[in-house]
């Protein structure tokens, strides 16, 4: 009567509390560390190079692109592998649109 499924749970709030209590009880914690800027830029550069090879595009890396990648990491999230990949894919998409346009 009036129950509603949320993420396959009838009582979503109770499910969340149960998961939190398990984390507290067993000390489970997953964290992702922020890369130092040099490592982040190296990952971005290599990811762009790989995506460019896959798309038959000449990779372009310069100081302006590095600054854009740093700005992206501050706006989107943090300097991590996922952010580097998202930036590289975004850059490639924009580059291909400009090339075709």
Image (spheres, rainbow, N blue to C red):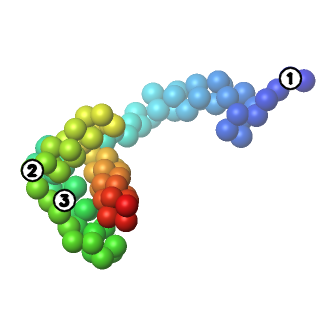
At numbered mark 3, what does the secondary structure look like: helix, strand or loop?
helix
Q: Find residue 83 and report its horizontal and vertical position in percent.
A: 31, 47
Q: Find residue 54 and report its horizontal and vertical position in percent.
A: 33, 74
Q: Nearer the viewer, residue 44 or 25?
A: 44
Q: Is residue 55 left or right of residue 67?
A: right
Q: Is residue 94 left or right of residue 25?
A: left
Q: Residue at x 52, y 32 (%)?
A: 22
Q: Find residue 84 and report its horizontal and vertical position in percent.
A: 28, 51
Please identify the quadrant where the N terminus is shown: top right
- Within 10 Å of the Cα at label 1, are there few (<14), some (14-19), or many (20+) other Cα atoms? few
Query: Do we see residue 79 in this rendering?
Result: yes
Which quadrant would residue 18 be assigned to in this image? Answer: top right
Query: What residue does disc 3 label?
Result: 45
Q: Residue at x 41, y 37 (%)?
A: 28
**Mark-to-mark CA distance, 1 and 3:** 53 Å
Q: Residue at x 52, y 27 (%)?
A: 21
Which quadrant would residue 68 be assigned to in this image? Answer: top left
At numbered mark 2, what does the secondary structure look like: helix, strand or loop?
helix
Please identify the quadrant where the C terminus is shown: bottom left
Q: Find residue 67 and report its horizontal and vertical position in percent.
A: 15, 43
- The earlier-in-sequence mark between 1 and 2 is 1
Query: What residue does disc 1 label?
Result: 2
Which is in the foreground here, disc 2 or disc 3? 2
Task: Mark 1 and mark 2 in contact? Answer it, CB < 8 Å.
Answer: no
Query: What residue does disc 2 label?
Result: 63
């Amino acid at each position: 009567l009036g129950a509603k499924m949320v993420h396959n749970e009838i009582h979503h709030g109770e499910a969340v509390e149960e998961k939190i209590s398990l984390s507290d009880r067993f000390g489970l914690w997953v964290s992702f560390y922020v890369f130092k800027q040099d490592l982040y830029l190296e990952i971005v550069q290599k990811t762009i190079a790989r995506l460019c090879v896959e798309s038959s595009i000449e990779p372009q890396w310069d100081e302006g692109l590095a600054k854009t990648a740093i700005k992206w990491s501050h706006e989107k999230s943090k300097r991590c592998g996922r952010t580097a990949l998202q930036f590289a894919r975004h850059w490639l998409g924009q580059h291909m649109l400009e090339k075709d346009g």
